Image (tube, coloured by chain):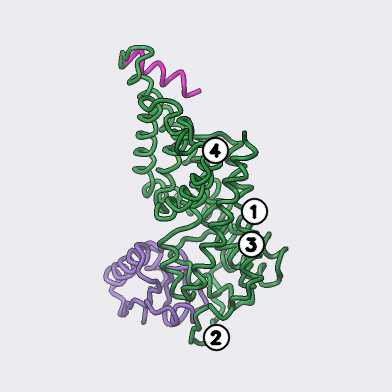
Amino acid sequence: MIKPVIDWLVYEIFKMPHGAILSEAVDFFLYDTIKIFLLLIVIIFIVSIIRTFFSPEKTRAILSQKRTYAGNVLASLLGIVTPFCSCSAVPLFLGFVEAGVPLGVTFSFLVASPMINEVALIMLWGMFGWKVALLYIGSGLVVAIASGIVIGHLKVEDLVEKFDHKKPGSAVLGAEMTVKDRIDFAKDYTLDILKKIWIYVVIGIGLGAWIHGYVPADFLAKFAGRDNWFAVPLATVVGIPLYSNAAGVIPLVSALTEKGVALGTALAFMMAVTGLSLPEFLILRRVMKLKLLVIFASVVGVGIICTGYLFNFILR
Amino acid sequence: MKIEILGMGCAKCKQLMANAEKAVKETGVQAEVVKVEDMNQIVGYGIMTTPAIVIDGEVKAAGKVLTVEQIKKLIV
């Protein structure tokens, strides 16, 4: 639907020559940018409406009744829809643990919530198609559930920093939202996210378009193809400091897969970008001993690396 | 009246602080606006998301940045 308009603009209005690399790169850039922004606006809006029906307080109430396994599965699913930003990671963590949510279940939530987020999913859908987006949700859920179960079995409760405060009161917040409240919330939230990420999206797609047009196909196959065993762990480690730029990273990764980076490696990289975040670790250090943070990062990291290998193996 | 802004110094907390100060100034209500950054105190209010606004010891909103207008309604 958008494609013919863009083609017309590039070749008829800008009078760029057919078949030239530059025209193709411009065409690719305009098409992807418009498509991604349309998707971002529509889907973030819908997701934020859904989110108004969930809150960390409700999620905590549900999870405090649950034990290992069922609790881990539920926590990972609720992690997708519960509104949560990493700056609230500490009060959320303490709130969960003190309400009796098992530590492993809390970790499942902490892994799933940032990893399976709407921006990453939209970018994946737009740049790779819905199959890869679903694959990402599925493997993200498995990593979150498995990491929580493993950490739960390690019995690391003594590695949570002790907090000396009065028994938390349960804050009862406001009346039910009206339909207008929900729409207003979704509108603000969508604008907020777009303001924060638009520049990364444009730069990411721009670089992607350049790579698409100018970098020879299979250029990267030697370094990051599926036969190179260390590509997956390397991609995972490189992904850790790139947290805030998930929106810009995905278009880039999409272009790189065209040039020979294996899909499993690309998925592992994106999961590390969203799920393992350095700023979040720094915040969580206030409530977890360093040893627990290292365990947390290692368990999730190993999960991501296994996912990468698995997809490189089955998607032959 | 005592208005407390709970948060550990993220951008949204600063915005909420600024909105609260503006609301107090524009309404002329006698109120003290203070920032609470101590984790123990924040968790003590039973909230799980920041920033939060507490008026005279009662949590009014958590996890969102109230606008100047919304804060005015709470303090007048």
Residue A137 in the image, given as x and y percentages of width and height: 60, 47
The verdict on residue A11 being magenta is yes
What amino acid is labelled 4 in the image?
Arg
On the same chain: label 1 and label 2?
Answer: yes
On the same chain: label 1 and label 3?
Answer: yes
Q: Colour of chain B?
A: purple
Q: Which mark is residue A167?
A: 2
- Callout 3 crowding tier (Cα within 10 Å): few <14, some 14–19, many ≥20: many
- Callout 4 crowding tier (Cα within 10 Å): few <14, some 14–19, many ≥20: many
User: What is the span of residues highlighted in magenta in the rendered image?
Assistant: A1-13
Camera-side mark, 4 or 1: 4
Q: Secondary structure at mark 1?
A: helix
What amino acid is labelled 3 in the image?
Ala
Residue at 39%, 35% in the rendered image: A205
Residue A135 in the image, given as x and y percentages of width and height: 62, 42
Camera-side mark, 4 or 3: 4
What residue sits right under mark 3 in the picture?
Answer: A75
Predominant secondary structure, magenta span: helix
